[in-house]
Image (tube, rainbow, N blue to C red):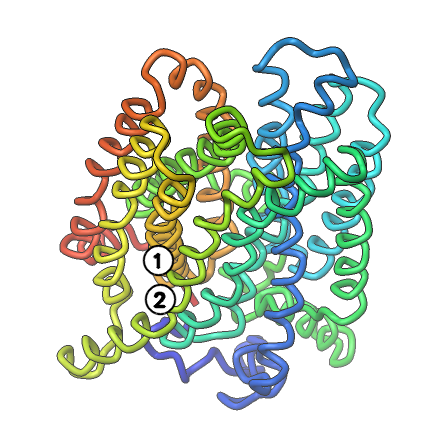
């Protein structure tokens, strides 16, 4: 098999040895040889639904109080859980969808999961009580999780390592801006049309984008494409011993069982310290992000006496920071890699991505001290909103670089690796906000956010360690790649 470093060389056809591979290095059926326009069209397709899914995770947050009033709910935990249950779906879904996308293909899994996502949004809109609402939110999260993990696989399928930075930036725009825009628009919808219309809007948007994905998306997983080609040639040439170039044995096409595939995300977490440490780092940041999502609107309603709709505008600070972060990452990411390649005999190493991560990591702690103490001291409302921007800048840079780094390290298992990251960060994002109300009640917004800020500050050395020692870990725990 070709390694990722030899990115222009692919396993070729060798019928004399019963091996089915690509016809040539320029084989047009190889996803990495697709026309540039086709590649970006596929990335944009998956990015559309990847925006709607994270948008759905937070858009209900401003409307929780209306649902609590309708259902006569007095427990703050139940109200918070109606928001974060969606993220628990993000924990369960990738464990099935990601390995199945590597076994059966990205297209069919994504289309099926999107259908579940839209169907259960209808259940949320029609929920008769808070328990059913929480249950349907969990199920929509399961359906909405597929795009978060299969997208990383699609990027690995279509692009060689040096080209993945911009593709990841485009793809993650929805992942990072969706949760920010969700409360902003959800607040106005809940206040003007009622909280149930938040879900009807998601049904309309999700149904539209899911339909486009079903119609225009195509399979990109090279392992699956080669298996299909192998099965076709076996019949056409009457040669049952033919095997795919991506198989480990002469006759194996389904040699890895579904059970083994389903445990792959856990295997990667245990087997690869790189994936385990990246997952822990991103989980901590994601928990901090959703802690903000579930408390920002409350802060501005209680402290600054804003209405539900207007309080959603407070998330603009995060949104502006996200845009700045994406632009900075797009301008510096690939440029930094090219400079480091020239100093390394024009040879790419995945750790080259991590130099910019160190820069972005410095922004995250700033927000919690700035936002927390300005809200505690009731400074002018613009001060805490601006204070949220550094978090958006840092989160984007860290998220983009570390996810792409994991894909670079293990491209053959990109979807399962993404599942491992999504599961851990979603679990933290679902559980940490449950402690938010009590923490802020006991410590106030100043010291409460400062506690989170100190944790973020303690995590700054993590990307530095990856940059210095990641190469040794990657080579020591090599899981194989194509």
* Residue 241 seen from this side: no
Placement of 38 over or under 383, stated as above or below: below
Q: Is residue 158 left or right of residue 122?
A: left
Location of mark 1 (residue) = 397
Q: Is residue 402 left or right of residue 221?
A: left
Location of mark 2 (residue) = 329
Q: Are marks 2 and 1 in contact (CB under 8 Å)?
A: yes
Q: Dot 1, how many residues are within 10 Å of its Cα: few (below 14), some (14-19), or many (20+)?
A: many
Q: Earlier in the sequence, mark 2 or mark 1?
A: 2
Q: Position of residue 37 (x, y in %)?
A: 61, 85
Q: Dot 2, how many residues are within 10 Å of its Cα: few (below 14), some (14-19), or many (20+)?
A: many
Secondary element under disc 2, as helix, strand or loop, is: helix
The mark total stands at 2
Quarter of the figure with residue 21: bottom right
Q: Residue at x 56, y 82 (%)?
A: 22
Residue sitting nearer the eye, 392 or 39: 392
Placement of 76 over or under 429, stated as above or below: above
Quarter that holds the N terminus: bottom left
Q: Residue at x 82, y 25 (%)?
A: 127
Quarter of the figure with residue 286: top left
Q: Is residue 258 left or right of residue 1?
A: right
Secondary element under disc 1, as helix, strand or loop, is: helix
* Residue 410 seen from this side: yes
Q: Which mark is residue 283?
A: none
Quarter of the figure with residue 482: bottom left
Q: Position of residue 319 (x, y in %)?
A: 48, 53
Residue sitting nearer the eye, 10 or 430: 430
For the residues labelled 2 and 1, the Cα–Cα distance comes to 6 Å
Q: Position of residue 381 (x, y in %)?
A: 42, 40
Q: Residue at x 50, y 82 (%)?
A: 12
Q: Position of residue 379 (x, y in %)?
A: 34, 35
Q: Residue at x 81, y 39 (%)?
A: 193
């Amino acid at each position: 098999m070709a390694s990722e470093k030899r990115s222009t060389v692919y396993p070729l056809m060798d019928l004399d040895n019963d091996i089915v591979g690509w016809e040539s290095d320029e084989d047009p059926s190889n996803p990495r040889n697709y026309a540039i326009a086709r590649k970006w069209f596929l990335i944009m397709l998956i990015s559309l639904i990847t925006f709607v899914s994270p948008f759905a995770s937070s858009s209900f947050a401003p409307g929780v109080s209306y649902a609590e009033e309708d259902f006569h709910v007095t427990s703050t935990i139940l109200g918070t859980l109606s928001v974060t249950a969606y993220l628990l779906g993000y924990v369960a879904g990738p464990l099935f969808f990601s390995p199945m996308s590597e076994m059966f293909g990205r297209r069919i899994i994504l289309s099926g999961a999107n259908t579940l996502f839209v169907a259960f949004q209808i259940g949320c809109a029609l929920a008769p009580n808070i328990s059913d609402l929480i249950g349907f939110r969990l199920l929509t999260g399961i359906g909405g999780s597929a795009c978060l993990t299969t997208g990383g696989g699609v990027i690995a399928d279509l692009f060689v390592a040096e080209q993945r930075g911009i593709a990841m930036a485009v793809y993650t725009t929805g992942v990072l801006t969706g949760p920010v825009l969700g409360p902003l628009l959800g607040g106005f919808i809940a206040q003007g049309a009622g909280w149930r219309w938040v879900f009807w809007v998601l049904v309309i948007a999700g149904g539209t984008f899911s339909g486009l994905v079903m119609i225009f998306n195509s399979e990109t997983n090279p392992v699956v494409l080669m298996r299909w080609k192998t099965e076709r040639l076996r019949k056409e040439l009457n040669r049952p011993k033919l095997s795919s170039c991506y198989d480990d044995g002469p006759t194996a096409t389904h040699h890895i069982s579904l059970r083994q595939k389903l445990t792959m995300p856990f295997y990667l977490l245990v087997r690869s310290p790189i994936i385990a440490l990246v997952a822990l780092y991103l989980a901590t940041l994601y928990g901090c992000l959703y802690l903000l999502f579930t408390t920002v609107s409350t802060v501005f309603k209680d402290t600054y006496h804003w209405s539900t709709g207007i309080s959603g505008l407070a998330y603009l600070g995060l949104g502006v920071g996200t845009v700045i972060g994406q632009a900075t990452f797009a301008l510096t990411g690939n440029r930094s890699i090219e400079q480091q390649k020239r100093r390394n005999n024009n040879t790419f190493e995945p750790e080259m991505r991590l130099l910019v991560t160190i820069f972005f990591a410095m922004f995250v702690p700033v927000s919690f001290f700035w936002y927390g103490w300005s809200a505690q001291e009731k400074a002018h409302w613009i001060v805490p909103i601006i204070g949220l921007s550094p978090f958006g800048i840092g989160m984007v840079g860290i998220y983009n670089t570390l996810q792409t780094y994991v894909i670079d390290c293990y491209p053959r298992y990109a979807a399962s690796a993404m599942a491992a990251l999504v599961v851990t960060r979603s679990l933290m994002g679902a559980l940490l906000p449950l402690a938010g109300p009590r923490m802020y009640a006991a410590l106030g917004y100043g010291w409460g956010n400062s506690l989170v800020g100190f944790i973020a500050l303690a995590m700054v050395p993590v990307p530095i360690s990856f940059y210095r020692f990641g190469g040794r870990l990657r080579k020591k725990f090599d899981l194989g790649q194509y």
